[in-house]
Image (tube, rainbow, N blue to C red):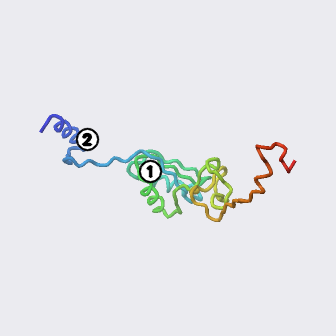
């Protein structure tokens, strides 16, 4: 055993409470914030959700906004496990589907606009998907002849 391997052995022994995993490293979870939309009607629902999500391993904070039906969980957790735990309480839950309306190119199209969204928010839309809209391009040269850079007196509208 070399010096480096000996030090790694000792540090993993101390860090894992005495069990050495012989080169198999556990993948550490990233610190992240998971936002959920959870249907909550009363203070009892809020307390039930908060207690349930706080019991998850790795959770540091749980913030709840009952008016917006929004739950924000921060910690070393996975989004799927947080969502599963929230659904286990019997409440309707989903990943937060809204973004601030100033981040969306067209916030009032049918896919983005949602009457149930909190004020200042619209539904998250994939910008590459354009369902129900069609761009029309005209190749008629008569439209382009209205204005001409070559002849400033050629403007037929004025």
Q: Is residue 44 visible?
A: no
Residue 23 place in picture, x, y as percent: 21, 47
Dot 1 lies on which element?
Answer: helix
Residue 112 at x, y percent in the picture: 63, 58
Q: Quadrant of residue 109?
A: bottom right
Gap between marks 2 and 1, in whole Å?
25 Å
Is residue 155 visible in the rendered structure shown here? yes
Residue 89 pos. (x, y %): 48, 61
Q: Residues within 10 Å of mark 2 (few under 14, many from 20)?
A: few
Q: Say which of 148 and 26 sits in front.
A: 148
Q: Which residue is drawn at 54% across and 50% down?
A: 64
Label annotation for residue 15: 2
Element at badge 2?
A: helix
Give the residue at x 61% y 64%: 131
Q: Residue furthest top?
A: 3
Mark sitting earlier along the chain (2/1):
2
Q: Residue at x 19, y 47 (%)?
A: 22
- Expressed as whole percent of the image width and height from the top left, the position of residue 67 reads 62, 52
Residue at mark 1:
54
Quarter of the image with the N terminus is top left
């Amino acid at each position: 055993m070399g010096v480096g391997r000996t030090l790694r052995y000792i540090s993993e022994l101390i860090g894992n409470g005495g069990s050495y995993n012989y080169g198999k490293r556990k993948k550490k979870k990233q610190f992240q914030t998971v936002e959920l939309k959870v249907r909550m009607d009363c203070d009892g629902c809020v307390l039930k959700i908060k207690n349930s999500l706080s019991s998850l391993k790795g959770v540091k904070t749980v913030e709840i906004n009952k008016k917006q039906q929004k739950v924000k969980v921060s910690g070393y957790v996975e989004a799927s496990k947080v969502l599963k735990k929230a659904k286990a309480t019997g409440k309707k839950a989903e990943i937060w589907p809204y973004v601030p309306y100033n981040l969306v190119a067209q916030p009032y199209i049918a896919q983005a606009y949602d009457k149930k969204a909190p004020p200042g928010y619209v539904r998250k839309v994939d910008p590459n998907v354009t369902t129900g809209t069609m761009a029309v391009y005209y190749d008629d040269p008569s439209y382009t002849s209205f204005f001409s850079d070559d002849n400033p007196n050629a403007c037929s509208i004025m």
